[in-house]
Image (tube, rainbow, N blue to C red):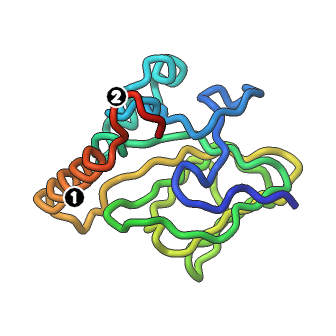
Amino acid sequence: MKFAPSSCACSSLTARGCSLTSTSLTACRSISGATSTAREPNAAHVARCPVTARILETAPRCRVAGRAPTAFFSILDANTKIPAHTGVTNTRCTVHLPLIIPPGCGFRVGATTREWVPGKAWVFDDTIEHEAWNDSDTPRAILIFDVWNPLLTAAERDMIQAANEVYVRYYAEPEGQPA
């Protein structure tokens, strides 16, 4: 069995663009724009997935300049496992929307293990240890995106957004300097 990288969020998963038949892998590019520090929509990605992009705009997604929103298609290759790992904050919840799920795929969050059901989303707090596997001979595809934790008030979301944006600006690399 192969192992995918074990850090959380976008870096933990291999993603393809919107065309699930594409053979060129790219590092977790956001449908709505992980290519710029302001997370502006990436026109090329939106053009490939206009319906998905429109639907995502209706979700209560986190909006933090330089950090969020994120949304991507996660392709887990055949006979591959994403080792147990945790996320960094419970201010958001992670949504998994299964799209192409061959038999032998599974997911565990804490003590709960599930099989994905195509079209049935699962929302969870990714600060709880979680892992995924694909024991089949074909790739598995899901749409992953984040939403605000529903327990946060609007004022709390605004404070978290402001604090994160200040942090991003403070630690940003000066113009012309490598990251």
> Label 1, on which residue?
160
- Where residue 102 sits in the image (x, y, percent)? 78, 50
> Label 2, on which residue?
40
The reply, left or right, for residue 7 in relation to residue 71 is right
Element type where label 2 sits in the image: loop
- The residue drawn where x is 35% and y is 53% is 147
Figure check: 34 above or below 9: above
Q: Nearer the viewer, residue 16 or 19?
A: 16
- Where residue 155 sits in the image (x, y, percent)? 10, 59
Number of residues whose C-alpha sits closer than 10 Å to that of mark 2, classed few (under 14), some (14–19) or many (20 or more): some
- The residue drawn where x is 18% and y is 51% is 162
Q: Quadrant of residue 37?
A: top left
Q: Nearer the viewer, residue 85 or 163?
A: 163
- Where residue 141 sits in the image (x, y, percent)? 67, 44
Tell me the quadrant of the picture where the N terminus can be found: bottom right
Figure check: 57 above or below 95: above
Number of residues whose C-alpha sits closer than 10 Å to that of mark 1, classed few (under 14), some (14–19) or many (20 or more): some
As shown in the figure, which amino acid type bears the numbered disc 2?
A: Glu
- The residue drawn where x is 43% and y is 23% is 42
Element type where label 1 sits in the image: helix
Determine the CA span between mark 2 and mark 1. 19 Å
As shown in the figure, which amino acid type bears the numbered disc 1?
A: Ile
Q: Quadrant of residue 173?
A: top left
Q: Quadrant of residue 172?
A: top left
